[in-house]
Image: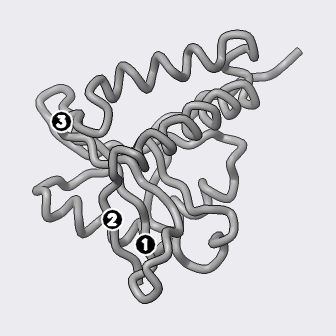
Amino acid sequence: MVEFQLMTRADFEVWRSVSIANYAKDNVSSGKWTSAEAVSRSEEEFSTLLPDGLATPENYLRFIVNEQTSERVGVVWYALRREKGRSYIFVYDFEIYEEYRRRGYGTKALLYLDGVVRQMGQDMIALRVFGRNRAARGLYEKAGYEETDIIMSKKL
């Protein structure tokens, strides 16, 4: 079983730095951004979404922890969003660390998140996944997520 654990300010700074670099790399790999602009665009998005860092209201940054061993096996960042008169939870980051993948932690963490979201009084969770990330897409589909939009491109 898993549970979520709060990040400290120091944890947040490390996570932020790594996440900005990873998000930049993912956007370059997907063809969305160029290498020259990727890090600055990634930093800009993080600054916009988390203007007060860890203290940004209605944003929840948590470690995914193995309940038995207290090991940190991953991270999740979700936020309450309001759009067109409706509120929902949006998952900005969900990662099971490489050495813990394919052990059921992803499925358990998504089920745990379902419970957390219900306790918040919300009935919908949305997220974005890069199309080439087939493993993540499979995990989300297995957990009951459905595609709502598909953007395709072709490099020439």
Regarding mark 1 in the picture, which secondary structure is present there?
strand
Upstream in the sequence, badge 1 or badge 3? 3
Query: What is the quadrant of residue 70 in the picture?
Result: bottom left
Tell me: 97 left or right of 79: right
Q: Nearer the viewer, residue 12 or 141?
A: 12
| Position of residue 34 measured from the top left corner of the image (x, y, whole percent) | 73, 14
Q: Which residue is mark 3?
A: 57
Farthest front residue in view: 10
Asked whether the residues under the numbered discs 2 and 1 touch, taking CB atoms below 8 Å apart as contact, a structural biologist would say yes
Tell me: 13 left or right of 155: left
Upstream in the sequence, badge 2 or badge 1? 2
Q: Amino acid at mark 3?
A: Pro
Q: Amino acid at mark 1?
A: Val
Which image quarter is the N terminus in?
Answer: bottom left
User: Disc 1 to disc 3, how far (Cα)?
Assistant: 23 Å
Q: Nearer the viewer, residue 21 or 1?
A: 21
User: Disc 2 to disc 3, how far (Cα)?
Assistant: 17 Å
Q: Which residue is mark 1?
A: 65
Farthest bottom residue in view: 68
Give me the residue at 51% from left, 21% from top: 43
Give me the residue at 68% from left, 48% from top: 133
Q: Amino acid at mark 2?
A: Gln
Q: Nearer the viewer, residue 47 or 139?
A: 47
Give me the residue at 58% from left, 40% from top: 18
Which image quarter is the C terminus in?
Answer: top right
